[in-house]
Amino acid sequence: MSLPHNIEAEQALLGALMFDNSVLERLPVVLESDDFYDPVHGRIYAAIAGRIRAGALADGVVLKEMFARDGGIQEIGGAVYLIKLMEAAAPLTAQAQSYALLIRDLRARRDIYRICQETARKALNGDGDADAEGMANEAERALQRVVGAGGANDIGLQDAGVRVVENLSRPYRGLSTGIYELDKLIGGLLAPDLIVLAARPAMGKTSLAVNIAYNVASGSVVDRDGQVIRPRVVAFFSMEMSADQLAGRALSRSSKSHGALAFTHSSLNASEYRPRSDDVAPLLLRLPQSLRIDDGGRRSVAHMRAVCRDIRSRYGALDLVCVDYLQLAVDPSARKDGRVVELGGITADLKGLAKDMSVPVVALSQLSRAVENRIDKTPQLSDLRESGSIEQDADTVVFIYREHYYLVQNEPHPRENEDDSDFGRRKRDWAQRKLETKNIMSAICGKRRNGPVGVTELRCDLAHDIVSDPEPGNNGPPARRQHWMDD
């Protein structure tokens, strides 16, 4: 069995290049010598392209002298073969362009076949230390390189500028988080951005991510007449919590009368704290079915990519990807190189996922314990755990911080030689500040590649898994809020 190839297309393209050297500049793909199935054709193409790019002539006469002593050319006819190529030349530039695309496509097919064969051989023989997931991950990356190798993707700066100007007259095309103050802070969710939500444990980052995913999935894509085309589709990879736990949080968010614990823990003794199934059953209709949850354990980005493709094929679209959280993801192929290198590969792959799927990716991240060792607990970029690659690959980094959490942990105690009145005043101030900050979550934008950084305050009710704008009066006018909604 021979691998996919088309000798006639290779001959026609080479002949067209010798007949008219300017054809090379108009090819839709940048070919390399190893794109040709016949190695002799590859050498001829390399000689032609090399001379043309150097500003020299590359016709049959010149090539005859260049290949006068080339054994490969002599075996297939020598100078006579070069004449045959010119006779087989594609008569039209459009045909030559089609042949170039065909040659690149056939080369990609050969590469795909070899990758699959090599993966099958490794799977059968158990080569190396990689497990099945590692082999699949390696094959996925190799196949992605094949897909990404085709075609010239460059664009002139002026042409890109034209697209920017055209976009100015179009409605805002990003996604709203459903939280106006957060949209103002980060500019909404734009593809293909990688947005990292980072915090220490118990700050509410999962709650914020669930609220964003819920808000997006509850929305719809509408046409200019306001008719619903389809629901928004979200892929949520939860490597820490189960789908049932996330659903319990969503039900608690909808009911507002029962905390998330009441939905997810059956060991509560007091029956009055548990909602009745008849009362909450109608709330199920509010839960968006287009919020798809993958609650497996430690997942690789290759697995996430496959799930995203499956969701997109079933729903016809994918609008947002959420990953909870980075430090629980794995890269089997880089595991032996250490956790820092592995995490760097994961963040780079997530950015690649955002670009390949053309969707925003929201990824959660833990912060290092260095935060706990400072008097000022406000997080900063240097606190990103295990790897500077998170800061490097992320387009936006938002830190989640709750002063109330640290106030609860640090109740005042009498100081040495402090009188009762001073201690009482300090404790009253502490109690007042604790009360004021109880439902406040600070969102701190530490990095924004395409805009300014800043800080905003959100309202949080973590018992019911609600993160929203502050109380009415601080939300901005309704007309302004509509700007962030999807058209």
Image (cartoon, grey):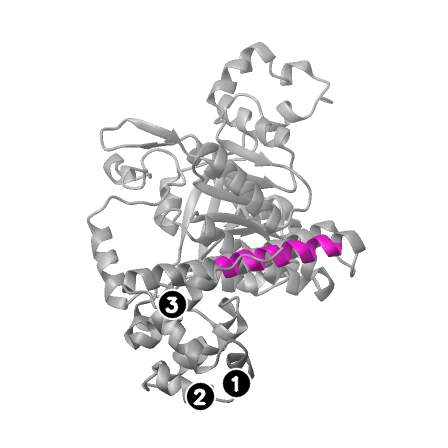
Q: Amino acid at mark 2?
A: Met
Question: Answer yes or no: do the residues labelled 1 and 3 have beta carbons within 8 Å?
Answer: no
Rendered-image quadrant of the N terminus: bottom right
**What residue range appears in magenta?**
106-122
For label 2, the residue is 66
Q: x and y percent of residue 52 in the render?
A: 34, 81
* Residue 480 visible from this viewpoint: yes
**Towards the viewer: 424 or 92:** 92
- Amino acid type of disc 1? Asp
Label 2 sits on a secondary structure element that is helix
Reading the image, the residue beneath label 1 is 70
- Count every numbered label the image shows and give the total: 3
Q: Please tell me which residue lies in front, 369 or 384.
A: 384
Quadrant including the C terminus:
top left
In x, y percent, where is residue 481? 29, 38
Label 3 residue SS: helix
Choose the circle earlier in sequence order: 1 or 3: 3
Q: CA distance from mark 1 to mark 3?
A: 21 Å
Q: Which residue is mark 3?
A: 13
Tell me which corner region of the image, top left, top right, bottom left or bottom right, holds residue 374.
Answer: bottom right
Q: Is residue 109 magenta?
A: yes
Magenta stretch: helix, strand or loop mostly: helix
C-alpha distance separating marks 2 and 1: 8 Å
Task: Specify whether residue 424 is in view.
Answer: no
